[in-house]
Amino acid sequence: MQTLAHIQYGWLLANIDKDLNLTERRLITLAAFVPDIDSIAQLFGTDAFYNYHHIVLHNFLTMFIYLVIAFIFTRRIKVLALTALSFLLHLGTDYVTSDWPLQLFYPFSKFEVTLEEFIPSEIIISLLQPIFAYGIIIATIIILIKYRRTFIEAFSKNLDILLINFALLPFKNRCAFDQNRALYKCSECGKTLCAKHRYFIKGLKVICPDCKKISVNSVNQTENR
């Protein structure tokens, strides 16, 4: 399964509880990404990729290390349990959708597990992979509609907001300063904005002309004191 799909599955798991905050959702989402860091081996050639991917970080030891790191950011048992489940979800989906063996007990054992022992690789690739792919697309759309967020928030909350507004606002919203279709929303006052009336500030946040004036006046007053 592709890394992006794993991230989305981790993010979907992070959204099963609406009470989780952004940091907790990030911990859970990134747990589904961590195993694929070993795919960096492809930078050293095809042989290195096939020798180390699905081995070096696709194991229970890596999961334990990640949980220790996650413990620094949260003490909530529920979050840590979902984080572990997210990591296991990566291993599980790799097992179900790939004929590539996993060494779950690496580096202590080179014992391999693969679904191909029980199901022909043709079925895994032509049937199971599409089922999981379409499933994640549908689930992602449902959460986008329900919570107005995507897996991009795991890396940048402001970029996630920016892209969602750009995609959804034009259908039903107009700019608060003219009648052009709105593409942005002011992060300070919530006014909808077109490209002409939006201003970017630090961290990919968007503000409107009114809030920009307030910000400038506030800075000027501070400097005059």
Image (cartoon, rainbow, N blue to C red):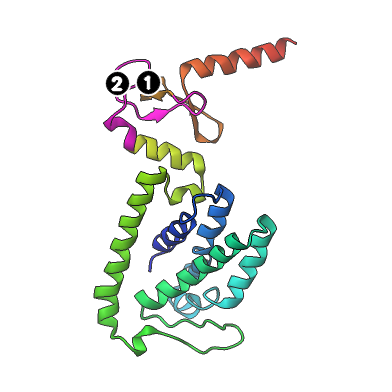
**Magenta stretch in the rendered image:** 168-190
| Residue type highlighted by circle 2 | Asn
Which residue, given by chain and number where applicable, does mark 2 sit on? Answer: 180
Q: Secondary structure at mark 2?
A: loop
Which residue, given by chain and number where applicable, does mark 1 sit on? Answer: 196
Instruction: Say whether disc 1 or disc 2 marks the residue closer to the N-terminus.
Output: 2
Asked whether the beta carbons under mark 1 and mark 2 sit within 8 Å of each other, the answer is yes
Q: Is residue 182 magenta?
A: yes
Looking at the rendering, in which quadrant would you find the C terminus?
top right
Quick check: 38 left or right of 115? Answer: right
Residue 73 higher or lower than 193, as above or below:
below
| Residue type highlighted by circle 1 | Lys
Whole-percent x, y for residue 62 in the image: 59, 72
Q: Badge 1: few (under 14), some or many (20 or more) residues near its Cα, within 10 Å?
A: few
Measuring 71% from the left and 14% from the top, which residue is drawn there? 223
Residue 111 higher or lower than 175, as above or below:
below
Quick check: 173 left or right of 114? Answer: left
Measuring 51% from the left and 51% from the top, which residue is drawn there? 154
Nearest the viewer among 131 and 52 is: 131
Whole-percent x, y for residue 38 in the image: 52, 70
Disc 1 from disc 2: Cα separation: 9 Å
Q: Of circles 1 and 2, which is in front?
A: 2
Looking at the rendering, in which quadrant would you find the N terminus?
bottom left
Q: Is residue 219 magenta?
A: no
Quadrant assignment, res 2? bottom left
